[in-house]
Image: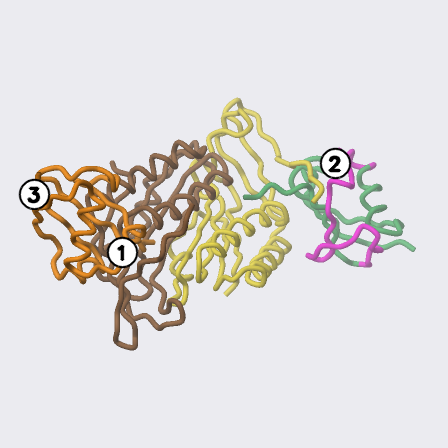
Chain colours: A green, B yellow, C brown, D orange
């Protein structure tokens, strides 16, 4: 079953994707699979082990299933402060 | 009032400090991060901070609430700049009021460490040499 | 300009902080001691700080010079109030600028500890109950 | 040989002495002896082990001989900060 997601990109992921957000229709069973799909499409160099994932503005787990209509964000290593 | 805030314009730390004044408190510790004119051996012109605003605000608020639980403090605040910054600009401010200085220092240090490692904010540095780049420090295991 | 000063009137920390602004510095740590409305279980009305001024200024200056030697910091300042203070008043301010936060925090903590243990300043507390007294903490061995 | 000193008192020592400073002519061989003499006169309760001593605005040693015309201060345990 495929789901429609809004994907948001920040920092170097946004530069690599060339957009700040996009709509994705995916059959990936979990968020790890969603990232793998987008990594292949955009050539992201950051491995999943260096990222965190958030859904609808809260941290989520890579094994969570993507929810229809949700906003998914991949969080590169942070560098505030 | 939230304890954590993002600011897309320069801000003055004085009113943030004033908001923490408390007659029960004997100690106040503050930390500020300033934009240095160099980093890792390279001359820096300025930088841009970008945030995932909704999540940064939530995570910042969680860090300050946790600090109030973990340490014997009265209150704490943090403001982090986003947007374009020049060298010398104030990038982040943390302030903690407490009965005694041990807790004030420990909580202030803990908050800035957690903010740096957990809050989704990214630094894009512009170098005097003309290039620029995102800082994505490789995560270390805890 | 001296790094350590006594002040017999209320002072504003903002210009002290500004004096430490430095484009080479990425970190700034500050500590403030405030007059609490209680101490050792007793309600406090206010206090008076007395100093042996000539020696306090010399010893304070030595502490700040030592801090600049011991820690990787850019500069440091300390101002200590003397005279009559009310609860909530600022009693002492320490500020440190440094390349990185480890040194800024460590030096700031070291300075306030040394000032409290070495500088000839004495606190005379007035209690809500009507009495008053000098605080002469029993020295501990190092 | 006796020497003339100005002695300064602070905090509880000043309260106990009833004056902020006084002139002392003493034959004591060292600063420890000077304090002992004044302790007997004023009834100071602080033992010498809890004090420091300063001469002419600098810390000194208890075994130093008093110098003619100098200013001697006894420093009770401090409580700034």
Residue A42 place in picture, x, y as percent? 78, 36
Task: Give the SS element for disc 3.
Answer: strand
Assess whether mark 2 and mark 1 are in contact (beta carbons under 8 angstroms).
no
Q: Residues within 10 Å of mark 2 (few under 14, many from 20)?
A: some
Q: Which residue is disc 3 drawn over? A: D4
For the point 83% across and 41% down, the residue is: A36
For the magenta stretch, what is the residue range? A40-68
For the point 32% across and 40% down, the residue is: C19
Which residue, as the protein is rendered here, is positioned at the far top? Answer: B129
Q: Which residue is disc 1 drawn over? A: C122
Q: From the image, which quarter does the N terminus of chain C lie in?
A: top left
Q: From the image, which quarter does the C terminus of chain C lie in?
A: top left
Q: Nearer the viewer, mark 3 or mark 2?
A: 3
User: Which dot marks residue C8?
Assistant: none
Q: Residues within 10 Å of mark 1 (few under 14, many from 20)?
A: many
Q: Gap between marks 3 and 2, in whole Å?
A: 80 Å
- Badge 1 sits on which subunit? C
Residue B13 place in picture, x, y as percent? 41, 52
Pick the front one: D17 or B134: D17
Q: Which residue is disc 2 drawn over? A: A46
Q: Nearer the viewer, mark 1 or mark 2?
A: 1
Q: Nearer the viewer, mark 3 or mark 1?
A: 3
Magenta span includes A66: yes
Magenta span includes B117: no
With respect to residue B19, does C69 lie above or below? above
Image-based side of B132 in relation to C62, left or right: right
Residue B32 place in picture, x, y as percent? 46, 45
Which residue, as the protein is rendered here, is positioned at the far right? Answer: A1
Pick the front one: B13 or C83: C83
Residue D6 place in picture, x, y as percent? 10, 46
């Amino acid at each position: 079953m495929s789901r429609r997601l809004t994907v948001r990109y920040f920092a170097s992921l946004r530069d690599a994707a060339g957009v700040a957000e996009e709509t994705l229709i995916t059959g990936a069973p979990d968020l790890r699979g969603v990232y793998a799909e987008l990594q292949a499409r955009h050539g992201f160099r950051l491995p999943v082990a260096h990222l965190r994932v958030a859904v609808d503005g809260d941290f989520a787990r890579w094994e969570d299933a993507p929810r229809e209509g949700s906003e998914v964000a991949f969080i590169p290593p942070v560098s505030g402060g | 009032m939230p304890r954590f805030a993002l600011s897309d314009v320069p801000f003055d730390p004085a009113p943030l400090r004033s908001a923490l004044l408390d007659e029960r408190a004997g100690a106040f510790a503050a930390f500020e991060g300033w934009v240095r004119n160099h980093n890792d051996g390279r001359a820096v012109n300025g930088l841009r901070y970008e945030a995932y605003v909704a999540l940064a605000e939530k995570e910042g608020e969680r860090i300050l609430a946790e600090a109030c639980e973990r340490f014997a403090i009265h209150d704490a605040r943090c403001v982090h700049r986003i947007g374009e910054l020049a060298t010398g600009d104030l990038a982040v401010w943390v302030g903690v009021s407490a009965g005694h200085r041990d807790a004030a220092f420990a909580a202030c240090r803990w908050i800035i460490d957690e903010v740096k490692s957990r809050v989704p904010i990214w630094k894009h540095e512009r170098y005097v040499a003309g290039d620029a780049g995102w800082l994505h420090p490789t995560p270390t295991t805890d």
